[in-house]
Amino acid sequence: MNFLYKNKYLKYKNKYIQLKNQYGGNPSYSWLIKDNEELPRVLEPEFQEDLETQYNFGQAVKILFQKNTYYITPSAKYKFENKILIREQKIRNINEQEYYFFEALRECAIQNNVILRVAGGWVRDKILEIQNDDIDITIDIMTGKNFSELLFVFINQRPDWKCSKPAIIPEDAEKSKNLETSTMKIRNPEGKIFEIDLVGLRKEVYDNPESRIPTIINATIEEDALRRDLTINSLYYNINTSNLEDYVGGVRDIHRKIIRTPLDPIRTFNDDPLRVLRTLRFLCRFKFTLDPITDFAIGDQEIKEKLGRIISRPRIGNEILGFFKKGSNPLIGFTKIHEKGLWNIIFGGEGNWGDESILLLNNLGDKSIINTLATITYPLYIKDIGRTFRLKEKTSVDTCITVDLRLKNEYEAIINKIHKSIYKIITILGEVNPTLWKRSDVALIIIDAEDYLNNMIEVGKILKEELFYNIDCFITKYKLQDSYKQTNFDSSLVCKSFDLSPSDGRKLGVLLKILFAWKFDNPPGNFEEVIKLKDKFLQETEEKTRIEEALFAEKQKQKKAQNKEKEKGKGKKI
């Protein structure tokens, strides 16, 4: 038990025993604290279930006494309104470091006649008992910049405390920073560092329907709560009073596991369509249920079109990455995107390729970001097989990853490696009996996957389960996991020994692949043995080089024909 409340626990346990004798063992009691006078009362049975299961108990302590459950709530205020229990309460699991940190902030706030509140995610996660070190603080009658300057002086005057100079983050709507924010780091005497963001209470007015950049106006705490994206993110911990403040029913929504917006969701999403993806991100993270009206609004045609029209691609991609935060289930978000007709708006492309993607994703085990992106874009990869691309023309997968989602190029490179290996395994080894596989056959294919071999096998299993199970067993049996790290023969030595010129790139490349394969099938083999088989290797190289050159010539011929057709089409349009 938290040491801060141990004495209260012992004190109120004795009072419960007395009340049990007085009232005959009623299962639930509480204290209403008013003007420092403690007034015991018995809760009516119809409200006991709500009290015990739907609400956070603040500083409440649970006691089991003679098979009855009692709750100590020494600092809570209760009132009943429309048969709904509404309560102003304290957060129960503030740790010792946070307690003394907030005490310091409270002193500074009182000294400067302001009210400080921790807002949003930290409060939500405290109720959910999730660790969160991201502390956003609102100030009621002052800007974050002005208060941070006062706090800097105040903290550095305290013995053994240190505070960094405030850093000002300018407003940037594209990064969801609609107001100038001050950020600073504070270190307590024990060495614990708190990093906080400070900003004034605000209200957002959206004057331009074609922009998500609002006009910012000073606001009351109630207005600040209403302008936020979701009720579960609209909670406040009042540092001055140590109370939890809930103006939109966020506590109830957390305990009933409901995702909804404080205002009408049509209005909320119309003001900023990016909130649609933020809503889905929190849906993935907490596995809650969408409020029916919020769920309906996500599928609104006008909002969907506006999302694709006014939201920048980097912001969309960043929200999609949020689907993969620790503990999240991205399948929930991707399924909802598909269900609401947002697939092509988010991921681009034409046609119903999302239908196949979502079916594959449903069967994927490990839904890491690499596995998920490789899975949903595999239909695009197959669609591009056989296409001839012009110079610098992007593939469908590249377009999805680097243009529509605007993710880092490294994602596209990794996913292409996985796709390439999967396709080769299916087309080259898929029809061959596994007992006839050679180590070189498998190694030369999986080498493309490099460090992402496990991802390739995981995704491959949802396409051809038995085939990729056999591949996995084969790799383990012959220890081929690090095939791509195998040292190849020195190319300059090969050129000299086989009388090749370094400029003869195609033939040299073919020969090195042949030697590489031979090395896998003959692990103890060395270069001296290669020289003994020189004529054999040269003959094989000549044959494979002729085949490669013929294939290259055919591709070039097809490419020229396609370009001519395109030029004719342009001429007709003109």
Image (spheres, rainbow, N blue to C red):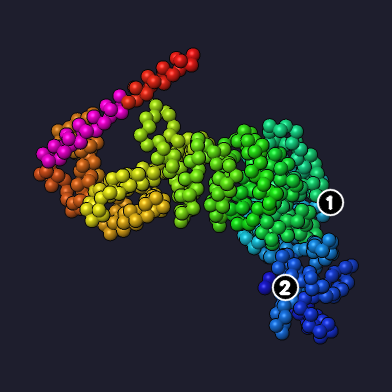
Which of the two residues, 293 or 226, is positioned nearer the viewer here?
293
Which of the two residues, 433 or 173, is positioned nearer the viewer here?
433
Say left or right for 131 vs 55.
Answer: left
Across and down, in percent, residue 88 comes to 80, 61
Rendered view: 239 above or below 8? above
For residue 234, which numbered disc appears in the image? none
- Magenta region's main secondary structure? helix
Instruction: Point out the stretch of residues depicted in magenta.
Output: 534-557
State how far apart marks 2 and 1 are (Cα).
Answer: 33 Å
How dense is the environment of label 2, judged by Cα within 10 Å: few (below 14), some, or many (20 and up)? Answer: some
Rendered view: 326 above or below 380? below
Say left or right for 331 vs 436.
Answer: right
Q: Residue at x 28, y 49 (%)?
A: 431
User: Residue 171: within the magenta?
Assistant: no
Q: Residue at x 70, y 80 (%)?
A: 64
Q: Residue at x 37, y 37 (%)?
A: 385
**Amino acid under label 2?**
Val
Q: In which quadrant of the rendered image does the N terminus lie?
A: bottom right
**Amino acid under label 1?**
Asn
Q: What residue is disc 2 on?
A: 61
Q: Earlier in the sequence, mark 2 or mark 1?
A: 2
**Residue 260 shows in this picture:** yes
How dense is the environment of label 1, judged by Cα within 10 Å: few (below 14), some, or many (20 and up)? Answer: few
Rendered view: 6 above or below 193? below
Across and down, in percent, residue 30 comes to 80, 73
User: Residue 535: within the magenta?
Assistant: yes
Q: What residue is disc 1 on?
A: 113
Query: Do the residues under discs 2 and 1 have CB atoms within 8 angstroms?
Result: no
Q: Residue at x 48, y 16 (%)?
A: 573
